[in-house]
Image: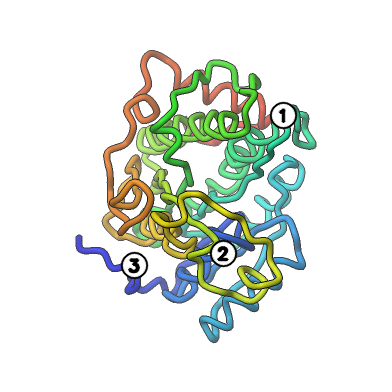
Amino acid sequence: MTWDPDQLPDQTGRTVAVTGATAGIGYFAAEQLAGAGAHVVLASRNAAKLEVAKEAIREQVPGASLSAVVIDLTSLTSVARAAEELAALPRLDGILLNGGMVTMRRGETTADGLPLMMGSHVASNFALVAGILPTLGETGREHGTSARIVHTSTGFVRRFAFEVDDLMRTPRMSIAAYTHAKTANEIYAFELDRRLRAAELPVASIVTIPGVGVDAKTPSRAGIRDAATPYQRNPYTPWAQGKDTAAWSAVRGLTDPDAQGGEYYGPTGALRGQPTRRDALVRTAAPEGDLATRVWNQLEELAAIRVPVG
């Protein structure tokens, strides 16, 4: 279908959660979903920042329907509490798994002793999905559609190949550790969709990449992106996009009525562009042998929980 990110399908009546919703791509995804009529549950670890984000959205979308859930993706205990809150909602049509920590220091761990980026980007999302999957399935069945689990990955996965036989083995360089975690997350996301299909659950698992979003091209939002918030330089700025347009691929994954589980969305260009369905990377979407199963089994151990499917 022809897709216009400025004219989203009406989301009135739908409830969508967004992690990492107090800054960057997560914030703008939440703003765009609210503008289309969805009730948006903003999720982040800082309660005060959640209130700032709600006010910023309401400045752009008067009357926006919003609520908030505190979640610290570096703590499985916090993830479990947040999952309980989300699972108790009357309906949950989708979730954008956008949050996660990035560190430049090697050896940092989560509260549960996991490598920081593998723990916050992958194991915590695995645990969160385990807690909310029954509610997503019930919503899909009740409303005759597929609920959506949208995973945010990175184009670095396409550029650099990493072994994921041992998820606890962290590469030395920060960007390598980040890409290693996102590689594992893509493998998990596609395996999740296969298991959802096999179980005939009306829930779709979709992978998206944002391209490159930079502060210099991001529109101002009070408390989110303004003179008082930290500014990060980026050498790709002349060729990149704002974080508002970097959110487009994830928002399409959540709202496009034609989107299917197992699909992969990204910008038309290497760094920016209209959100479009692209070919998934074979080594993460259909890895050789039993790698996907082994990644899944490791995540069950790291997250200390089983996803109720497959």
Q: Residues within 10 Å of mark 1 (few under 14, many from 20)?
A: some
Q: In the structure shown, which secondary structural element does the residue marked by tag 1 occupy?
A: loop
Q: Is residue 282 left or right of residue 46?
A: left
The kind of residue on which mark 2 rests is: Tyr
Q: Is residue 99 above or below residue 12?
A: above
- Identify the residue at the far top of this view: 289
- What residue does disc 1 label? 106
The kind of residue on which mark 3 rests is: Pro
Residue ID at (65%, 78%): 55
- Identify the residue at the far right of this view: 111
Q: Is residue 280 left or right of residue 245?
A: left
User: Residue 12: horizontal and vertical position, in percent?
Assistant: 42, 75
**Is residue 55 at least partly visible in the picture?**
yes
Q: Residue 206 lies in what quarter of the image? A: top left
User: Residue 137: horizontal and vertical position, in percent?
Assistant: 46, 50
Q: Residue 221 lies in what quarter of the image? A: bottom right
User: Disc 1 versus disc 2: distance between alpha carbons?
Assistant: 28 Å
- What residue does disc 3 label? 5
Q: Is residue 106 above or below residue 259?
A: above
**CB under 8 Å between callouts 1 and 3?**
no
Q: In the structure shown, which secondary structural element does the residue marked by tag 2 occupy?
A: helix
Q: Residues within 10 Å of mark 2 (few under 14, many from 20)?
A: many
**Is residue 139 at least partly visible in the picture?**
no
Q: How is the image coloured?
A: rainbow
The kind of residue on which mark 1 rests is: Arg
Q: In the structure shown, which secondary structural element does the residue marked by tag 3 occupy?
A: loop
Q: Is residue 147 left or right of residue 224?
A: left
Residue 27's disc number: 2
